[in-house]
Image (cartoon, grey):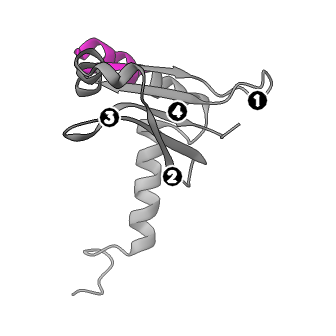
């Protein structure tokens, strides 16, 4: 019964099914549909009041890199309440997403309680 593919599909079938779902719902990676969907999600996020986000689309011909900036509600309050947030900023650029070749840069400030987040930058390259 466990080997019956009519009841239990194999791994390859599930992968292809998920890829079809992802392409239909989210569009392809690094394609125009992906940027349209991301712009829609950013608009909803900005309208929700939970924070702010902005994006610059990737354009190879114009030489524009993909840049996505996010400031959550907590990060916004850190900017308002912590005085040294405008003067002292630590940068952690060690994380990356391999499938899209993007890097994540986290911005922090310090206080007596420890490090507090200031923002997130997601970029297509480091130049």
Crowd band around label 4 with a 10 angstrom C-alpha radius: few (<14), some (14–19), many (20+)? some
Vertical side of 65 occupied by 101: above or below: below
Marks 4/3: CA distance?
27 Å
Secondary structure under the numbered disc 4 in the rendered image:
helix
Instruction: Pick the residue in front: 113 or 102.
Output: 113
Mark 4 near mark 1, Cβ–Cβ under 8 Å?
no
Q: Quadrant of the C terminus?
A: top right
Give the residue at mark 1: 60
Expressed as whole percent of the image width and height from the top left, the position of residue 82 reads 26, 22
- Name which of mark 4 and mark 3 comes first in the sequence: 4
Residue 103, numbered label: none
Crowd band around label 2 with a 10 angstrom C-alpha radius: few (<14), some (14–19), many (20+)? few
Residue 94, numbered label: 2
* Residue in the image at 61% along x and 30% along y: 66
89 is within the stretch colored magenta? no
Magenta stretch, main secondary structure, is helix
Q: Quadrant of residue 64?
A: top right
Instruction: Pick the residue in front: 16 or 64.
Output: 64
Give the residue at mark 3: 117
- Name which of mark 3 and mark 1 comes first in the sequence: 1
- Name which of mark 3 and mark 2 comes first in the sequence: 2
Residues drawn in magenta: 40-52
């Amino acid at each position: 019964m466990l080997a019956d593919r009519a009841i239990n599909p194999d791994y390859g079938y599930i992968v292809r099914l998920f890829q079809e779902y992802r392409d239909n719902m989210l569009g392809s990676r690094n394609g125009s549909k992906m940027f349209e969907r991301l712009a829609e999600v950013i608009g909803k996020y900005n309208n929700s009041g939970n924070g702010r986000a902005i994006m610059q689309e990737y354009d190879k011909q114009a030489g524009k890199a993909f840049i996505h900036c996010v400031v959550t509600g907590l990060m916004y309050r850190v900017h308002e309440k912590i005085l040294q947030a405008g003067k002292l900023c630590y940068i952690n650029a060690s994380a990356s997403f391999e499938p899209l070749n993007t890097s994540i840069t986290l911005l922090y400030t310090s206080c007596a309680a420890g490090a507090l987040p200031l923002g997130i930058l997601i970029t297509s390259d480091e130049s």
